[in-house]
Amino acid sequence: MTMTYGQYLRVPELLDLQHPLSGGKDHDETLFIIIHQVYELWFKQQIHEARFLARALEAGNDPTALATLKRMLTILKTMVGQIDVLETMSPVSFLSFRSLLSNASGFQSAQFRVFEFILGNRKAAAVERYPEGSSERLALAAALTEFTLWQSFLRRLKLKGFAIPEPLLAAPLQALPESDPQLQEILLDIYHNHPHDRMVCELLVDLDEGIQEWRYRHVKMVERTIGARIGTGGSPGAAYLRATLFTPLFTDLWTIRDRI
């Protein structure tokens, strides 16, 4: 059986997924739809990579873990770069079709929430925003039962012989970790005496910084497009997004900076 490019990638089905509600009257609606569909594809890939990374870390498979981290960072750069494309759409262009979105909002992206949950930014209340029994709610609930990426990294350190405090590994974290003085001493030792392990730490910092950069660019894009308006779906818009800025995922890797 032969396989064509279009068949393998399901190109006809892919190109049939864009249905501007303005019926083509608003030129930029097609761009808006495609950009956000591409983001959902990148979220899917980042989830795929993050879970692969977690398994590699826990197995002590550093070559795979490092390669996967570098791939995730490269994807993040692409995600940030896509905002440049979205910003070619003027506020007037967006506002001409914004009302057609009704209650639809990027705030509702379940895939981004799953990605956040894997990274460790978990809020159980987010699960309840999706209907009981829905695929989105089930995916988020399942993610809450997994160890976070930070815990997978700590499990790697324990496998390598570091005395990681047991409470940090006892159960999947349900919120961002608080600073742990004992863990900080271990991380300081790693930075001064274990260059290979330090390299893994620094790539995690790169990942954390990359997520924060994406959030910042997203906020500025929303501000320049809709200003202080309430977001679609009734979300607080830019005000909510600003509240998510500058909150690190891997707290202790930042806390030790003034002691290295």
Image (tube, rainbow, N blue to C red):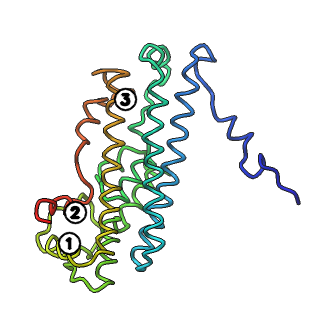
Q: Choose between 118 and 5: the one closer to the eye.
A: 5
Q: Which residue is mark 3?
A: 221
Tell me which residue sits at (48%, 50%) in the image.
Answer: 75
3 or 1: tag closer to the N-terminus:
1
Q: Please state the horizontal and vertical placement of residue 111, each as a whole percent of the image.
A: 46, 49
Q: Choose between 231 and 80: the one closer to the eye.
A: 80
Q: Residue 103's quadrant in the figure? A: top left
Q: Are marks 1 and 2 in contact (CB under 8 Å)?
A: yes
Tell me which residue sits at (19%, 78%) in the image.
Answer: 165
1 or 2: tag closer to the N-terminus:
1
Asked if 230 appears above or below 159 in the picture, the reply is above
Answer with left or right where residue 78 lies relative to residue 182.
right
Q: Which residue is mark 2?
A: 253
Three-letter amino acid code at the position of disc 3:
Met
Distance between the alpha carbons at the discs numbered 1 and 2: 7 Å
Pointer 3 local density, CA inside 10 Å: few below 14, some 14–19, many at least 20? some
Q: Please state the horizontal and vertical placement of residue 126, each as a whole percent of the image.
A: 33, 48
Q: Which residue is mark 1?
A: 187
Distance between the alpha carbons at the discs numbered 3 and 1: 36 Å
Answer with left or right where residue 4 lies relative to residue 207.
right
For mark 2, give the secondary structure: helix
Answer with left or right where residue 48 lies relative to residue 181.
right
Q: Please state the horizontal and vertical placement of residue 198, each as a whole percent of the image.
A: 28, 71
For mark 3, give the secondary structure: helix
Three-letter amino acid code at the position of disc 2:
Leu
Pointer 2 local density, CA inside 10 Å: few below 14, some 14–19, many at least 20? some
Tell me which residue sits at (35%, 36%) in the image.
Answer: 217
Which quadrant of the figure contains the C terminus? bottom left
Q: Which mark is residue 103?
A: none
Pointer 1 local density, CA inside 10 Å: few below 14, some 14–19, many at least 20? many
